[in-house]
Image (cartoon, rainbow, N blue to C red):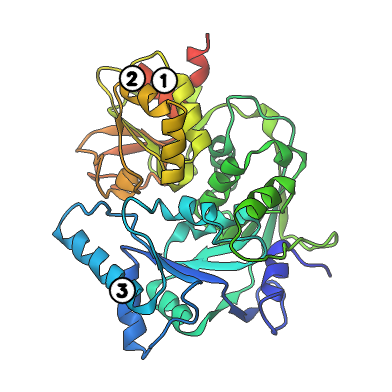
Amino acid sequence: MGRTIAEAIIASRTTDRVSAGAICQVKVDFAFANDITGPPAIEEFKRMGGVRVFDPDRCAILPDHFTPNKDIASAGQAKIARLFAREQGMLYWEVGRVGVEHAFLPEQGLVVPGEIVVGGDSHTCTYGAVGALGTGMGQTDIAGIWALGETWLRVPETIKVVLSGHPSKWIGGKDLIIHLIGMIGVEGARYRSLEFHGDAVAEIPQDDRFTMSNMAIEAGGKCGIFVPDETTLAYARARARRDFTPAYPDGDARYERVVEIDVSKIEPTVALPHLPGNSITARECSKMEIDQVFIGSCTNGRISDIEKAASILKGRRVHDNVRLMVIPASYEVYNRALDLGLIRVFTDAGASVCTPTCGPCMGGHLGILAKGERAVSTSNRNFVGRMGHPESEIVLAGPMVAAASAVLGRVADPRELDS
């Protein structure tokens, strides 16, 4: 029986027998943590007797969650991470040179096709967009990987997602993945690999693929992997810091189930509180008034997301009752937005534009919600209290819906502003 892409990647990194459900000891190609998960991983590394990380060029800490440091506690966290990284000679970037980890690492060519990438963050599944098996683990696991360069994995069953048709210009990766999660549920892919196929994939830009792989975890997925095509390989070749060998599924691979989606039928889609699976079209909830809009995060803070939002906001003003925060996910994105004049579009519209950081995505800073407030956010989770007070609400959306909502003061389908 042939292998799925997740099985093929695992097989290339283990001597164990690979089949769905098997436990395999695997070599890890890249392992990282952030300013929240790094300090406890460091503590565990030392507690277990770790002396040196297995390869300082394949181990990293990225200060992106509570940075620029918002208070004394977060400054202390960052200091612990900084000193350990310096001591180990591992990869570390200061504020002003880093970005949101899941946007920054692919840009830097540090995650590449065919590899196993483990991060101290649940959205490490983002790297499936470049044909890697990316998955999040806890701090003890990260510490062990830093010390040994390997870990164990249960080989996931795989759900084949077949995307057909032609998406309209109003549809992006966020609409597609929220629609999928709405179909299968927030536990529909629990510990499964989502494997994306279909003729529509060729029309999904690389940035949108990152968005879709990122949110595989919101359906419970272990990973969400796009089969590498020329779009993926061109992106990787232009940035990769090391040689790579892409992995591909076999023609006779065995899938647990197949989900088929005609993307031409999808409208601008949002997820209502308090689950990413509460999918509904933006048109159907257009009477929901809002207080805040956040455009950014590891889900939708890349340059094409910024461009889409700016195309809606250009020549318009943010609604008087709404505050808009725009946070590019990296300095590559920020500088490109500067070069294109997009930062001025946002500030002219009445938005706040901030340095690359996770910011309000997980209730960190730069946009916390008060009791009773509602936000439209391009982030990936809308759990109770995710962005602030437990009695606030988050509506998840793509950048065009978010920008249109900022203008109209309510959840809005961007086609309402089409002129």
- Rendered location of residue 108, percent (x, y): 52, 55
Callout 2 crowding tier (Cα within 10 Å): few <14, some 14–19, many ≥20: many
Q: Distance between the Cα atoms at labels 3 and 2?
A: 41 Å
Above or below: residue 51 compared with residue 370 = below
Mark 2 and mark 1 lie on one chain; the one further toward the N terminus is 1
Callout 3 crowding tier (Cα within 10 Å): few <14, some 14–19, many ≥20: many
Q: Residue furthest left?
A: 72
- Rendered location of residue 376, percent (x, y): 37, 32
Amino acid carrying mark 1 in the image:
Leu
Q: Which residue is mark 2?
A: 349
Q: Residue at x 49, y 41 (%)?
A: 302
Q: Is residue 35 visible?
A: yes
Q: Residue at x 72, y 54 (%)?
A: 227
Mark 3 and mark 2 lie on one chain; the one further toward the N terminus is 3
Mark 3 and mark 1 lie on one chain; the one further toward the N terminus is 3
Q: Which of 159/165 is in front? A: 165
Which image quadrant: the N terminus? bottom right
Q: Which residue is mark 1?
A: 313
Q: Residue at x 41, y 85 (%)?
A: 52
Q: Which residue is mark 3?
A: 40
Q: Distance between the Cα atoms at labels 3 and 1?
A: 42 Å
Disc 3 or disc 1, which is closer to the eye?
1
- Rendered location of residue 337, percent (x, y): 44, 33
